[in-house]
Image (tube, rainbow, N blue to C red):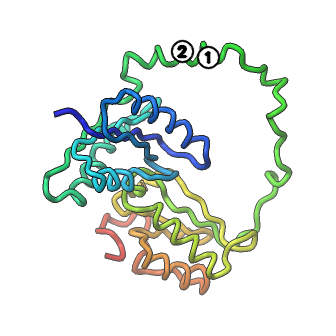
Amino acid sequence: MPFDTVVIVGRGGYGAAPREELERIVSSVADSGRYRDVRYAFMEQGKPALPAVLAACVDAGSRRLLIVPALVPMDRTLRWWLPLAIRDWVGEHITDGTVEIALAPPLGDSKHLGDAVSAAAMDARNCTDIGKDPTIKDRARSWNQIPAHSHQVFLCHGPRCTLANAPKTWAYFQEKLRENELRGKQGVMTVRTSCLYPCDLGPIMVVHPDGTWYGGVDEAAVDRIVAEHLVDGEAVPEYACVPGAPARSKPGS
Ligand code: FES
């Protein structure tokens, strides 16, 4: 049976430009008329995230989905764990066996990629010399000042943390910071990162300057980390993980 749905997956990115790039690919695949649904998703930082798109496709009636990673190059670890991460998602969300999800080979393995790059080079033959391009702006002055934040908080948006709902945790975290007036130059600096390594404990959050690692950071964990750690200055032991300690099940569960 052919696939009814294709999900084009980009690595990550914020703002309109990465979305527009993926929308162009979606529109060419949709123009083929072979699929009833074609969408894009981001595997790590950026929205919509892959789990949300998979859930939306299944809710909209997709039953045979093909995930196509639009990544060049696709690194070795990604080739290894992306199928595992998707299998985990299916195991958690598809309990009746009515949905099949397949993963296409990496784009770089396709013999057609060279043709696409050649065509892009032909399209670019009249591009402006970079030295004369008026749209390229000088650096902002603030780029050489260290911000005086009270804390720096890193929330992993690597692929497995993203599948474990890191984008939802991030949105909730931002809301809590706003409610507690912890944003701004003297407040809490927040950064979305790529994989920080202990993926099975995700979503992972690291709070500096004290260097506390938290795992299993959901909305309940955010409530406590904001109130107890960022406001009162005490780490939350139920969610904290000790670097180098033997592996254990997800904190907070
Ligand atoms: S993806 Fe978050 S720790 Fe690996």
Check if mark 2's residue and mark 1's residue have beta carbons within 8 Å.
Answer: yes
In-front residue for pair 51/152? 51
Q: Which corner quadrant holds the C terminus? A: bottom left
Left or right: 190 as drawn, with respect to 62: right
Q: For mark 1, does the 10 Å Cα neighbourhood hold few (<14), some (14 to 19), or many (20 or more) residues?
A: few
Q: Residue at x 42, y 72 (%)?
A: 218
Residue 116 is situated, as x and y percent measured from the top left of the image, at 48, 18
Mark 1 = which residue? 123
Residue 240 is situated, as x and y percent measured from the top left of the image, at 44, 74
Cβ of mark 2 under 8 A from ligand 1: no
Instruction: Say above or below: 219 vs 125.
Output: below
Report the amino acid beneath label 1. Asp
In-front residue for pair 183/15? 15
Residue 12 is situated, as x and y percent measured from the top left of the image, at 51, 45
Q: Secondary structure at mark 2?
A: helix
| Location of residue 78 (image quadrant) | top left
Q: What is the number of the mark on residue 119?
A: 2
Q: Secondary structure at mark 1?
A: helix
| Location of residue 193 (image quadrant) | bottom right
Instruction: Say above or below: 251 vs 42.
Output: below
Spatial separation of the CA atoms under disc 2 and disc 1: 6 Å
Q: Which corner quadrant holds the N terminus? A: top left
Report the amino acid beneath label 2. Ala
Left or right: 126 as drawn, with respect to 43: right
Q: Residue at x 56, y 46 (%)?
A: 13
In-front residue for pair 161/238? 161
Residue 101 is situated, as x and y percent measured from the top left of the image, at 24, 43
Q: Residue at x 37, y 16 (%)?
A: 111
Q: For mark 2, does the 10 Å Cα neighbourhood hold few (<14), some (14 to 19), or many (20 or more) residues?
A: few
Left or right: 241 as drawn, with respect to 103: right
Left or right: 157 as drawn, with respect to 181: left
Q: What is the number of the mark on residue 85?
A: none
